[in-house]
Image: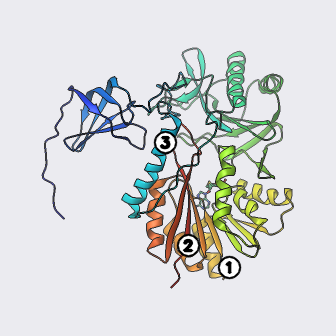
Amino acid sequence: MMKTPKQKPPLSRGEKIQLGIERLNHDGEGVARVNGFTVFVPGAVPGDSVTANVISVQRTYARCLLDSVDKPSPSRIKPPCEHFDSCGGCQLQHLDYQAQLSLKRDMVEQALRRLGGLDVVVRPVIGMTDPWRYRNKAQVPVGMDGPTVKAGFFARRSHRIVNVDCCLIQHPTNDRVVDVVRSVLKETGIPVYNEQEHTGLIRHVVARTSFSSGETLVVLVTNGHQIPGLDKLINALRSRLDNVAGIVQNINTRKGNVILGPEDVTLWGRPFLTENLHGLSFHISPRSFFQVNTVQTEALYKKVKEYAALTGNETVFDLYCGIGTIALYLSRHAGRVVGVESVAAAVDDARKNAKLNKIENAEFHIGLAEDVAPQLQRKWLSASVAVVDPPRKGCEQRLLDAIIKMEPSRLIYVSCNPATLARDLKYLTGHSFTVREVQPVDMFPHTTHVETVVLITRVKE
Ligand code: SAH
């Protein structure tokens, strides 16, 4: 391999420079080039001409602070949310929605080309008609700022809590829950968690609202078991909030960033939420995964169903099945569906959801997909159609090997991370599969996250 000669960076710290922004990186920061050298400018968007101050210079890139936008990009808009500059929740509110969608399509195309070596056409992103107030779940950290209780979001790249009383991507009820909990904590003096010292009690408020019924499940994450003034807390939440399905305490006494702990205690009502998708009802427990954008979930699943092209006889595997949503949705069009999921509470939900919807051709296995799928494959249980929907780190190679051996005619890969998607597709295309269609769906408007559904078929040998 040719070595590139070491070059001196063409910039120095403290310098003020003019830049034309070419693209955004994965964190939504503007990217420019100076004599081939990469420069990051948070707050700038593609098409902007800006003046920026160089704040650090590394071997291959420099970071700048935006000083002024001298000629704004035609896609630049005023961020509708007043917290946009400080809150770490959204990264793209300063770009108009159509530009966000084309940016996401480019992100997928580039990842597939650069990391997967795949030259495939990526379809235009399926966007939302109304891309606001779409989240069904809020997970809000709670903390003290001197004598004041704060609940909101972590500031960008930090654990400083920004107090937020209106989040434009949340269901309004979730905003209301956070507001009420904040007020009740102020009034009752129930101790609030201090992350540095690992002291205090209330760590997070998690609110989940059903788009179909409007009911809400309130989860209070606590660093300990006893909540002083518990009755007052429950009464206040019940009297000030409409349509509460249940109030649950989740106990998490561990240090670190994981929000939910291993134990749930029902404080009032029932410990699950009900949501409808495509005419099916689903129970969702506090620790089970459920897609955060209910409206787009229907669009995503519709695409999965279209790609599955079921005739009624197939055995369909739904790997990483959560509460069984995809498996149960496809069960009406297949011979048999088999779900695999590692979180026990979610598998319980999936089994209950099959009963709730009177579905008898569904079975669910608990365990890691990479352990269970090879076991099923060795027992000669084979999938004619397989769906995988892994977390951000993608699929283990062991799982991909088991799928390859099963020889499904169609494999549908649902991904929330283009980089690991590209890696896994590269492996599959090296093993008798070919990528047919790539369809991103915008599950997370105003953020840099992209969801993609891919149809992969077997190459006839
Ligand atoms: N398809 C579902 C869930 C997708 S999220 C839906 O649309 O709602 C990914 C799921 O995979 C989560 O429920 C998570 O608990 C589960 N999971 C994570 N790692 C896993 C693994 N190695 N094996 C099986 N399930 C896993």
Above-or-below relation of 369 to 16: below
Residue 460, position as x, y percentages in the image: 53, 82
Task: Examine the rendering and report whether any part of residue 293 can be seen.
Answer: yes
Q: What secondary structure is marked by label 3?
A: loop
Give the quarter of the image for residue 193: top right
SS of the residue at dot 1? Answer: loop
Residue 354 lies left or right of residue 255; in this view the side is: right
Looking at marks 2 and 1 on the same chain, the residue that comes earlier in the sequence is marked by 1
Nearer-N-terminus badge (3/2): 3
Instruction: Identify which residue is drawn at 54% across, 15% down.
Output: 146
Q: Tell me the distance, in whole angstroms, between the alpha carbons under discs 3 and 2.
A: 29 Å
Identify residue for label 2: 457
On the image, the x and y values in percent for residue 355 come to 85, 60
In the picture of the structure, the residue carrying the numbered disc 3 is 448
Residue 147 lies, in percent from the top left, at 58, 14
Amino acid type, mark 1: Leu
The Cα–Cα distance between marks 2 and 1, rounded to whole angstroms, is: 19 Å
For the residue marked with disc 2, what is the amino acid? Thr
